Image (cartoon, grey):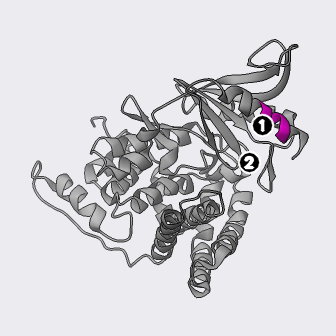
Amino acid sequence: MTDDSATQERVFQALSVHPGVKRIDTHAASVLLDGTRALKIKRAVKFPFLDYSTLEKREAACEEEIRINRPLAPQIYHRVVAITEEPDGSIEIDGLGRPIEYAVDMSRFDENRTLDHVAKAGPLDAELAPAIADAIAASHARAPVADGVAWIASIPALIAGNSTGLRNGDHFEAALIEQLCEASHQAFLHVRATLEERARHGFVRRCHGDLHLANIVLIDRQPVLFDAIEFNAQMATVDVLYDLAFTLMDLLRHDQPVAANAVLNQYLMTAPVETLDALAALPLFMSIRAAIRAQVALARLRRPAADGPGTLDEARRYFELARALIHPPTPRLIAVGGLSGTGKSVLARALAPAVAPQPGAVVLRSDVIRKQLFQVGHTERL
């Protein structure tokens, strides 16, 4: 054990002795929950994609987490606090002694209100899906534009990395992994020119980067994005559609096709019209995201006290979804006509989730398109 790791264990033991404190460990952090407060401490670890090996680096990572996440969730993220060793040897939070660790000071929320838990309880209500889309769109609108060259160049490595990770443990057939890999590379070649054009037009941004359902929580009945990637700017610098694809994919994985379609269509309602040209990349983006989640589940199998059967089933479901998404069927066009007020839009929205490829059809409304041509918002009157 390194000196930093030993010091951290002292900190964890000292802070965990208080009645009611609950400790949750991940590979990169430990969160101490106490009443309405949460303290997130970076673990003294070093991986290829992050480095928390020194106190200075952990302090900087805490500061970066506040900088990245506070604009998304000011009701959760507050400040960085020092954990100090006092002259008498005791350990205090934000004391006057020598800082020996740092933590992100946060408000605790109801863990049962993250969208992965909400989705397991049944279909998401009709108002929630558009609110999710609006929250994601707002985060993209404020995200700084970045150079897209590195992002596009990284996609083949993402695909190859997924293949390597999925081979760990021999849980999936090698031939199926190779088929997914080959189909993904072919899909990338098909859309590469489109992605390069989008990068030139500012669609590659410093995004959340990890928008699966467990990182969206309902607070006061509104979806709040949290736990954005702060430890590696390159991992979070992506096409905004790739950021959205994580949420869409995870809604499909949690058997929420209607919500996934509603999120997509609401997002497109306010997105630049050029976003429609990039929908050919969505199957690839969602498939990559599903394969990443399959890898994450496989990694959890190696932890002590892991729920082997349940975690392996989760990995398999994500893997099968990745395989299904990378082979979208030929799209179809369904035209709905009729007099004003006869329910054309209602019918179209009802049909859309069931129209392949996933996550369903894009609903194109002539009145909205007319407003887009005049650069007018969809709720404004012409």
Query: In the displayed structure, does residue 325 sit left or right of residue 176?
Result: left
Principal secondary structure, stretch drawn in magenta: helix
User: Could you tell me which residue is drawn at 31 percent across and 48 percent down?
Assistant: 124
Q: Which residues are magenta?
A: 5-10
Q: Which residue is mark 1?
A: 9
Location of residue 112 by image quarter: top left
- Tell me if residue 221 comes above or below residue 84 in the rendering: below
Lateral position of residue 298 relative to residue 318, left or right: right
Can you give x and y, in whole percent of width and height, for residue 380 in the image? 31, 35
Task: From the image, tell me which residue sits under label 2.
Answer: 232
Q: Position of residue 57 (x, y in %)?
A: 84, 37
The residue nearer to you, when weighing 113 against 152, is 113
Q: Residue furthest bottom?
A: 175
Q: Residue at x 50, y 67 (%)?
A: 309
Q: Is residue 7 magenta?
A: yes
Q: Earlier in the sequence, mark 2 or mark 1?
A: 1
